[in-house]
Amino acid sequence: MEHLWAPWRMEYILDSQEPNDICIFCSFPAEKNDSANLIVYRSSHCFVMLNKFPYNNGHLLIIPFKHEADLTRLSDEIAVDLHHTLGKSIKVLQQVMNPHGLNIGINLGRTAGAGITEHLHYHLVPRWNGDTNFMPVLAGTKVLSEALNKTWEKLNQAFNK
């Protein structure tokens, strides 16, 4: 068996623990400090934020405001808005970042890879030909070509046109 080492992810794993049962996906939108919390867009039932520990530049999280872990327990209204917001996020990433492809995923439960288990969210990761190289494997380093605040500015402007 071959192993792929991604040591930079440990900060994410440790940081994503929910101390005192505080959910960042509930507290961040309530703070109304979108730039500091990396929230680029709000719809009626969902919001979109940059992942603080991205796999690639532009790695977005699409999150319902409702604190819910079970996708099947969302109301139809929230589920439709979540899907619509995911679609809007795809269009914005394609427009602003011009990726060659996209990964879309949702991890339900810790065993499935969810860092924040009690509040479901989609991951939308832009991909480019050659975006994986020797750096993570040999040097334990992931190269991100743009600062989060710069990516936030571009995406926030595109979402809110």
Image (spheres, grey):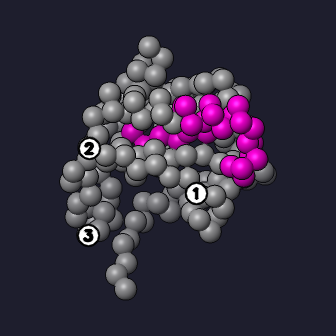
Q: Is residue 143 above or below residue 156?
A: below
Mark 2 or 3: the one toward you: 2
Magenta range:
58-85
Residue furthest right as drawn? 20
* Magenta stretch holds residue 69: yes
The residue where tag 2 is placed is 100
Left or right of 102: which side holds 110?
Answer: right
Q: Check disc 3 and give the amino acid type.
A: Leu
The residue where tag 1 is placed is 107
Query: Would you call the spot at circle 2 few (<14 residues within 10 Å), some (14-19), or many (20 or more)?
Result: few
Left or right of 146: which side holds 103?
Answer: right
* Magenta stretch holds residue 116: no
Residue 138 marker:
3
Q: Classify mark 2: helix, strand or loop.
A: loop
Mark 1 or 3: the one toward you: 1
Numbered disc total:
3
* Residue 44 visible to the viewer: yes
Residue furthest bottom as drawn? 1
Q: Quadrant of the N terminus?
A: bottom left
Badges 2 and 3: C-beta atoms under 8 Å apart? no
Q: Classify mark 1: helix, strand or loop.
A: loop
